[in-house]
Image: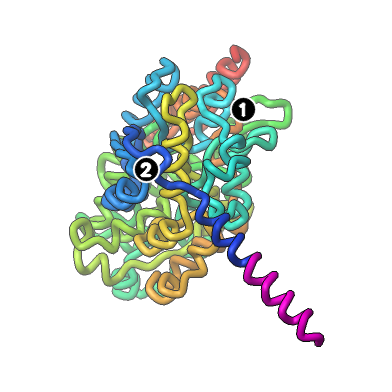
Amino acid sequence: MNRRVVAFLAIAALVLGTVGVASAQQFDWKQFSGTKIRFLMNQHPFTTFIQPLLPEFEQQTGIQVTFETFPEDQFRQRRLLEASSGADTLDGYMIMPGQVGAQYLEAGWVRYVDDFLADPTMTDPDIDLNDFFGGALNTFKSDGKVFGLPLQNETSLLFYRKDLFQQAGIQRPPQDMAELLADAALLKQGRVAGFAMRGKAANATSQIVNFLLSFGGSWLNEDGTSALNSYQSKQALAFYADLLRDYGPPGETNMSWPEVTSLYAQGQAAMIFDANVFRSIMEDPQQATDVVRNNTGYAPLPAGPAGLHPVVLVWGLSVNHASKNPGAAWYFVQWALSKANQEKAILAGVPAARTSAWQNEEFMKTAPADWIDASQKSFAVGDPNWNPPVKPVPEVRDAYGQAIVAALEGKPVGPALDQAAKSIDQILSNQ
């Protein structure tokens, strides 16, 4: 090749490289230095993970972040109160689009960030939206516009005590609902429940829906009416109620995820079914006994009559529509969900929403192989409708929750679900 051509190409490469560096350096993390922002956060493993890292963000940006963290029921109420009031002192919050997305979008309580994404002075060039799982990112889109970023993919798994399985002569985790019932019967010993799961009214619906779908049921009929009074739905609730009444712990109707995970972590349940994100609890010496930490196995939801139909949930972060500091809030969202922090999150047991995090070598070496395998199997076939695909989600969940409690109290399942379906149809007709 001609020496002049070689020299020209070398200079061009140098210039282009310099331009690339300059372009990357144009993003100013200190643009909002001195700003104070406030986020409402759910009591959740991601919150536990990210909070100790806030000083890093404050040092990098000069932005001071305040977290206000509440248990989930209180968190939802507080977020609803502030978002609906138009409080400009609330800058952002955790949100599950599958839970309140339709309501918040229709009311205009979330801020679309497409203008920030299109502005190189507002968005880190390394954000790489393509690195998020497509399904997770799509839950934060409406009519092609983006209203937040996902922080995790979540699905529910069976947590089980391998040592107790061995003692009971059980060779593998249950593969179907019949095996789940048989294993729970063998494993119930004294004060140790064979199986535990949420049973606290509406709080239980996000978990029992896995059984509903796996028994062939669904939230709605094709005409938009409630399908919770179908034969399949009644079979699912009857199975769930019998399982917990016969082999579960006392007080199931008062149990949401904190109670269920604590029960298991303290060695008082041989199996539970709940979110894979709670692996972090089972590995925490401050929350779980040594026996539990050293003997927990993970498996997908046992298949029902209709097959394996787990649901997938996505949490994320959004900027409040009325925030007086939306730019600073967006800085926090993109920093908290950066590739680096998503890799740290998955190492801490939070099932990150970025594909690169799941490919992290340290994670692949240190995370339980059965947790990775069970999570990914569930992601592959997961149904996004963990909540009813309607706007009045809380009201519909409450109606279903009443039927769940009735069944756990030993009342006939058929009439309880007939009443739930009737109530839901009335709720939907009043939209």
Is most of the magenta stretch helix, strand or loop? helix
Q: Say which quadrant the C terminus sits in.
A: top right
Q: Is residue 353 above or below residue 386?
A: below
- List the residue tagged with mark 1: 226
Within 10 Å of disc 2 (Cα), the crowding (few <14, some 14-19, many 20+) is many
Find the magenta span and give its range: 1-15
The x and y percentages for residue 123 are 53, 45
Residue 53 percent across, percent down from the top left: 30, 52
| Crowd band around label 1 with a 10 angstrom C-alpha radius: few (<14), some (14–19), many (20+) | many
**Position above or below: 257 against 340:** above
Inspect the image, locate mark 1, and give the three-letter code of the amino acid beneath it: Ser
- Residue 375 is left or right of residue 345, and the answer is right
Q: Position of residue 15 (x, y in %)?
A: 64, 66
Q: In this rendering, would 213 be left or right of 30?
A: right
> Which mark is on residue 198?
2
Helix, strand or loop at label 1? It is loop
